[in-house]
Amino acid sequence: MKKQAISMNVVRRLPKYLRCISELLEEKIFRISSKQLGELTGFTSSQIRQDFNHFGGFGKQGYGYDVQALYGEICEILAIKKRRNAIIIGAGNLGQAIANYSGFREYFLDIKAIFDIDENIIGKPCCDLVIKDQQYIDSTIDEENISIAIICTPKEVASEIAQKLMNCPSIHGIWNFAPVDIKGNDKVFVENVSLVDSLYVLSFMMKQKRNK
Amino acid sequence: MKKQAISMNVVRRLPKYLRCISELLEEKIFRISSKQLGELTGFTSSQIRQDFNHFGGFGKQGYGYDVQALYGEICEILAIKKRRNAIIIGAGNLGQAIANYSGFREYFLDIKAIFDIDENIIGKPCCDLVIKDQQYIDSTIDEENISIAIICTPKEVASEIAQKLMNCPSIHGIWNFAPVDIKGNDKVFVENVSLVDSLYVLSFMMKQKRNK
């Protein structure tokens, strides 16, 4: 029984719940109340209950949550047991950092290719891949059934590349690291990672700490 | 006239307002209503008014917002005109990507040093710096009056390094890219950048698009 129109705030809390719950499982804790989960995650217990109600509840009155069941449910909701093929566009430091970040592979991301336009690095190894010429993006997407494109290009070309990617039938997600907001459409969701925004939050909070 | 207890949700919206407002200035738009600002940012106009009320308003009834004044106010709130000295710990791909990302310097971040423990890369150039041995972290923090430490180490050592950094008197902010949540304290704010969380959100939203 799913409700419609889950806000992005709820969606962004789900990975935090999952992280907390997987730590509980590692510690062999199999049952938890929303109050305890609140203490661990920093959210209120009523917020947690409200969030989980979007997906049909999970908890039992007077018992709390079965941690293993909760873990399974949230994995299911986030669809992270389904493996997905991805490509990286832009093989600068950031693109290579993402290709090398083994954490992503552990979950569901199979990075099948990394592209660049710079002839000096095309053909060079990166992780267990070889950096490919950007002209082969379309054919690789078709051949490898790519659903996620990770944009690590300079700001100036990111939007144009994103528009082209959105036209590829198999692409349903873009993970954008270029410092420009890219809008998705009905078919493609774009997750913009703005490191500058994160830096601004750090700056603000540092000021708050000093003013205390 | 500042109110207490601004929620992190409000804080995280401020950079998005700033980005939108600076784009307006580039387009020489000097006046805007909360309704128009809502259309541009995707937030509701009442949310925008509420958010700005935390900091004393800024708008005039029947006129809207003076875009230049608003830009100045939000810069002031975020404290991003104040330059801050930073170091990077961990000179792998991600650390080097951040050192090379000129965007950060444009704002307020002066990266003064980058450290690693790997003898094979210590002494090598990175951007306009030379990778230093991690044993010089403390002395560099003192000499260069470093207030921000950027952690780009593997997960296993990140928490221990963060604890040591928090003991350095001049450190008030940690920007953590290691995939582990680090908690701050009264003196130090820790901004955890969890790329895995962002990837989970992408996964969830891709599923939602497909289910439409």
Image: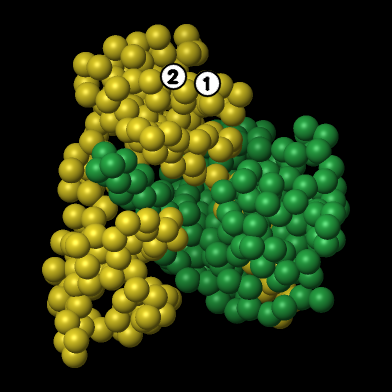
Chain colours: A yellow, B green
Chain designation of label 1: A
Q: Which residue is mark 1?
A: A160
Can you see residue A185? Answer: yes
Q: Secondary structure at mark 2?
A: helix
Q: Quadrant of the C terminus of chain A?
A: bottom right
Q: Residues within 10 Å of mark 1 (few under 14, many from 20)?
A: few
Identify the image quadrant of residue B9: bottom right
Residue appearing at x 63%, y 43% in the figure? B40
Q: Amino acid at mark 2?
A: Lys
Q: Residue at x 24, y 31 (%)?
A: A85
View extreme (front): residue: B62
Q: Position of residue B179 (x, y in %)?
A: 38, 55
Quarter the N terminus of chain A occupies: bottom left
For mark 2, name the chain. Answer: A
Q: Quadrant of residue A67?
A: bottom left
Frontmost residue, B188 versus B113: B188
How packed mark 2 is, by other alpha carbons closer than 10 Å (few <14, some 14-19, many 20 or more), is few
Q: Are marks 2 and 1 in contact (CB under 8 Å)?
A: yes
Residue B120 sits above or below residue A44 on the image: above
Label 2 sits on residue: A164
Among all residues in the image, which is located at the extreme bottom? Answer: A62
In three-dimensional space, the C-alpha distance between marks 2 and 1, rounded to whole angstroms, equals 7 Å
Classify A62 as above or below A56: below
From the viewer's perspective, is B29 left or right of A57? right
Which residue does the image show at 25% across and 84% down from the upper left?
A33
